[in-house]
Image (cartoon, helix red, strand yellow):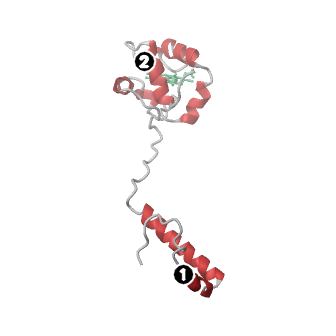
């Protein structure tokens, strides 16, 4: 018998007379196997594989303009491990920075902060651009 996908209760269609003949553990085993088969039928190949979590994948949705700016500037450090920059998509690294708040992070982006160069190399970026870029990298809304 082919398991029908996502049948809620695979054993419920068994006539009760037959059920009585099963010892409890055999019946449980049957249910477990049927469930496994059902799950395998549901999950096997039909659903798209979960996207591999690339460590540097930015999490927040961003406009094409922001992504372009990012690729031209911030990317050079914020997607290159070993530069000391909190990596884009690394929510843990960013959580240690986000608490500073929007104003401080914008200020540090524009004026520079330790080994972070002023404006991150993006001299044409506006304050709104910096905010969008930080949200893009951190995957969080600035507050
Ligand atoms: C030349 C490398 C480099 C580039 C380019 C760069 N950053 Fe950075 N950034 C860093 C480094 C390194 C740090 C970590 C500084 C530290 O804490 O020592 C950092 C930290 C930050 C921080 C956290 C500051 C804080 O207060 O903790 C923000 C925000 C930031 N960068 C935004 C940007 C943005 C936006 C861009 C692109 C416009 C950008 N960065 C481009 C190197 C860079």
Query: What residue is disc 2 on?
Result: 129
Residue sitting at x 49%, y 13%? 110
Residue sitting at x 54%, y 13%? 107
Residue sitting at x 56%, y 30%? 94
Name the spot of residue 41 as percent of width and height, x first. Answer: 43, 66
- Mark 2 Cα within 10 Å, few/some/many (few <14, many 20+)? some
Q: Quadrant of residue 30?
A: bottom right
Query: What residue is disc 1 on?
Result: 15
Q: Nearer the viewer, residue 133 or 48?
A: 48
First in sequence: mark 1 vs mark 2:
1
Q: Quadrant of the N terminus?
A: bottom left
Question: Along the horizontal axis of the image, is 96 left or right of 117?
Answer: right
Residue sitting at x 34%, y 27%? 64
Q: Disc 1 or disc 2, which is closer to the eye?
A: 1
Which SS class for mark 1? loop
Q: Quadrant of residue 5?
A: bottom left
């Amino acid at each position: 018998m082919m398991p029908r996908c996502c049948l809620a209760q695979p054993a419920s269609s068994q006539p009760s007379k037959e059920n009585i003949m099963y010892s409890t553990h055999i019946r449980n085993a049957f249910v477990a196997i049927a469930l496994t088969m059902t799950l395998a039928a549901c999950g096997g190949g039909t659903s798209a594989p979960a996207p591999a979590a690339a460590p540097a994948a930015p999490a927040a949705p961003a406009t094409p303009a922001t992504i372009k700016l990012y690729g031209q500037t911030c990317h050079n450090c914020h997607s290159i491990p070993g530069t000391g920059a909190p990596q884009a998509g690394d929510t843990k690294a960013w959580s240690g920075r986000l608490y500073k708040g929007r104003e401080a992070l914008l200020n540090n982006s524009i004026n520079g902060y330790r080994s972070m160069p002023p404006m991150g190399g993006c001299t044409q970026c506006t304050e709104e651009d910096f905010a969008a870029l930080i949200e893009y990298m951190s995957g969080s809304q600035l507050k």
